[in-house]
Amino acid sequence: MTEKQILGTNAATGRGQDYAADVDSDVRADANNAPAVLELRDLRTEFRIGRQWYPAVREVSLSVRRNETLAVVGESGSGKSVTALSVLRLLPASGARHGGGQILLDGRDLAVLPEKEMARLRGDALAMIFQEPMTSLNPTMRVGDQIAEAIRQHRKVSWKDARAEALQALEEVKIPAAASRYDDFPHQFSGGMRQRVMIAMALACKPKVLLADEPTTALDVTIQAQILSLLADLKTARGMAVVFITHNLGVVAQIADRVAVMYAGEVVETADVDTLFAAPTHPYTEALLHAMPRVDTDAASLDPIPGSVPAITAIPAGCAYAPRCPLKQPVCETTRPALNGIGGGHEVRCLVRAPGNGSPAPGVRPVMMPGVASNSSVKVQA
């Protein structure tokens, strides 16, 4: 089994389900050739602490195409959720600001739109599924009416028509006996059913781009597998672009087409999902994989990453990962690395592994990782 298959099996309740393997290769090829629906160009978001502004998202450049899932992974504090909230412009104006860059939706820069126009796009062309549905749903409103209200916000339809569309949305996300559950309140649903309601609400207006912020974190692994399968089916049926935020690499193995690894507010590695699992090149990506439990080994303990993600007020001057990196060189402490391509759409932000000439640094030799296919290798410093 490859590293990707092993982690996908972990996340799929031990039944060996690998939903990523079910994605048709022709569909992926079409997605790769399509123009980006959502593109971030050097996005920078800053928070005010005291009297100073500090960057929480630092020059992030990402893109996602129609019928494609881009997974954004990293530890808590890496800037994943802030990036998504920046796209929707949902951060509080009193303590956060857009520090630069572009947020392009079909070529239209959302960063410069008036708030009234941005409000029309939220929930319509752009939608988001939040991590904890119980805090996102209104506890005093019936779930069906909450979905119908979202539809009426963006569509000129009657309450009767909106209720019919809301019921259809609940049926689409496989709520059992949806017609009888329409008038129930959020507390009458289980955690998995509440998350399905949130998905129905996000997809009710058929958005072009869906941002999913760790939508399976609070669910048990069986329900998690069902939700991931549902999202994959809906993405394919509607041709949506999906940005899936998670810290779980097992989930990434199941659902993603491409992966962006974030650390300290910046992208440190991006590649298609097969390449990332077969040949993780940034030391942080490699450390994340080694910290994951595996079904093919009997290791008594995992390999934790020492230290923690730096606070935005204490970002190192050079490479942000340098204080935790076993490959650190003196130049890493003074020079901020660029995100350099190393071939095949694989980009890495590392002065040691990707110095900028399109190939690994001299002295880097391939070393096999357990569970990785024989024709794949992981580059480590000699």
Image (cartoon, rainbow, N blue to C red):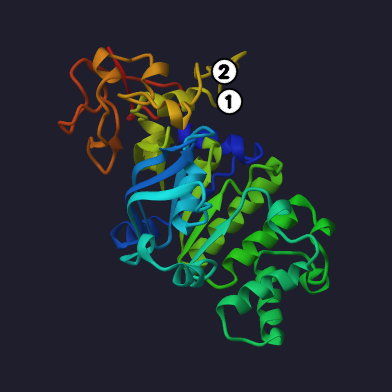
User: Vertical placement of 175 versus 357: above or below?
Assistant: below
What residue appears at the point 83 percent right and 56 percent down from the top-left corner?
Answer: 187
Q: Amino acid at mark 2?
A: Leu
Along the line of sight, which residue is nearer the eye, 44 or 234? 44
Q: Residue furthest left?
A: 357
Q: CA distance from mark 2 to mark 1?
A: 7 Å
Residue under pointer 1: 293
Residue 302 is tagged as 2
- Percent x, y of residue 292: 54, 26
Residue 213 is tagged as none
Give the structural element (helix, strand or loop) at label 2: loop
- Percent x, y of residue 194: 73, 56
Q: Please identify the quarter of the rendering in which residue 58 is found.
A: top left
What residue appears at the point 47 percent right and 57 percent down from the top-left corner?
Answer: 89
Q: Name the quarter where the C terminus is drawn.
A: top left
Along the line of sight, which residue is nearer the eye, 12 or 128? 128
State yes or no: discs 2 and 1 in contact (Cβ < 8 Å).
Answer: yes
Give the structural element (helix, strand or loop) at label 1: loop
